[in-house]
Image (tube, helix red, strand yellow):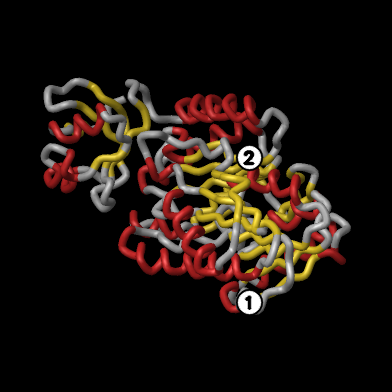
Amino acid sequence: MNYPVIKLNDKGFKNYLNQHLWFTSKDIIDFRKISKNLEPGSLVKIVTKENYFLGIGYFNPESYFSLKILTKHEEPINKDFFLNSFNKALRLRKIFYPYEKCFRLIFSEGDFLPGLIIDIYEKVIIVQIQTLGMEKLKSYIISALIELFNPEAIILKNDSAKRKEERLDLYVKIVYGKIEDPILVNIDGIKFLIPIKQGQKTGFFLDQRENRRFIVKIAEKQTLIDVFSYIGGFSFYALKGGAKKVFLIDRSSLALDIAEEIAKINNCKDKIITLHGDAFQILKNPPKSDLIILDPPAFIKSQKNFSEGEKKYKFLYFLGLKAIEKGFFFAFSCSYFLKMEMLWSLIKINLSKLNKKGKVIYQGGQAPDHPINPFVEETSYLKGLGLYIS
């Protein structure tokens, strides 16, 4: 285990003691010299300026956070390291999801593995790698997954825009086994077709699991408008709960086509109506409903575009509240930069503007297989409010 050494300065060591997993050039002694001599993505030993061991990580001078920690133990980063990490993560998932066959196994910093996301869809495994350091370790990752799960297929879904920050190519590749795309899975008794190659993220949004389960409880005899529906996760849970009809709004014709196929498989084709187009435009003249769910993409992707993104959220929530006379209203945001307090504020502003009364009956977040690292705020990103409008 003869890894090159990187020394943290006093500032970097203080951040280390504060449980940070990421470090910038300002935390590293002789950063420029190291950058010239060390290949980007290399595994490194991290020490104090007095040479006391701190951890093993990977280094990429091209990234703003140029150093990321993988372990605080003196251990080699190989297949056994990932096998041990995956086993720990799996044991945790089995506590709260003992019978689930579709779940997130690894949630990056939430599971202390920066740059790595792994979703399990029954016998198919989707891996997303977002950093150069983790990209160089993919052979170990794949080998460990094969040994632990004996899957039918493993797909590298490496098409996230985040990879561009580390100058990585975007690609989707089957690296083990074979699949028919989309894949058919059963989640909470609903049969879903999950599009892997052309689908969003890893194909489905497992983080909304608990929020969808709540919708089942209130959906009976309701007519739902599912805005930014994708393939209809909320819609099919609502139908499971006894909804009369669901309208799916999305700008992806592929997603809506798959939703219609899912409806056929679940024998509810007559209860769904797909509306292809811009959600903001459709909501200006919406169908009549008793239940509306707004689950948009992240309008605020960085602090730079906060103001512009905030205006989009505000206008969307306004249109959604305006669209419902009486019934249930749910607003979600998957942007880390839009805090729950701001979500509350935007809802209150729009209720006052429309002169409507609403009771908050639900507060939601990401499912527990997307654990939050209390020292990495970015791992807490999904939030939602449910109101009854009277």
Q: Quadrant of the N terminus?
A: top left
Q: What residue appears at the point 50 percent right and 53 percent down from the top-left corner? A: 334
> Is residue 156 visible in the rendered structure shown here?
yes
Residue 254, position in %: x, y?
67, 69
Which of 47 and 200 lies nearest the eye of the viewer? 200
The residue pinned by badge 1 equals 282
Q: Quadrant of residue 292?
A: bottom right
Q: What residue appears at the point 39 percent right and 30 percent down from the top-left corner? A: 77
Decide: few, some or many residues near mark 1? Use Cα within 10 Å; few <14, some 14-19, many ≥20. Answer: some
Q: Quadrant of residue 4?
A: top left
The residue pinned by badge 2 equals 103
Identify the secondary structure beneath mark 2: strand
Q: Is residue 278 left or right of residue 390?
A: left
Label 1 vs 2, first from the N-terminus = 2
Which of 222 and 227 lies nearest the eye of the viewer? 222
Decide: few, some or many residues near mark 2? Use Cα within 10 Å; few <14, some 14-19, many ≥20. Answer: many
> Is residue 181 visible in the rendered structure shown here?
no
Q: What residue appears at the point 59 percent right and 78 percent down from the top-left corner? A: 281
Q: What residue appears at the point 66 percent right and 31 percent down from the top-left corner? A: 97
Give the amino acid type for the residue marked by disc 2 in the picture: Phe
Q: Closer to the camera: disc 1 or disc 2?
A: 1
Q: Is 293 situated above or below 339?
A: below
Which of 196 and 112 lies nearest the eye of the viewer? 112
Identify the secondary structure beneath mark 1: helix
Q: Is 66 situated above or below 331?
A: above
Q: Is 213 situated above or below 254?
A: above
Which of 326 and 299 lies nearest the eye of the viewer? 326
Residue 258, position in %: x, y?
73, 64
Q: Quadrant of residue 71?
A: top left
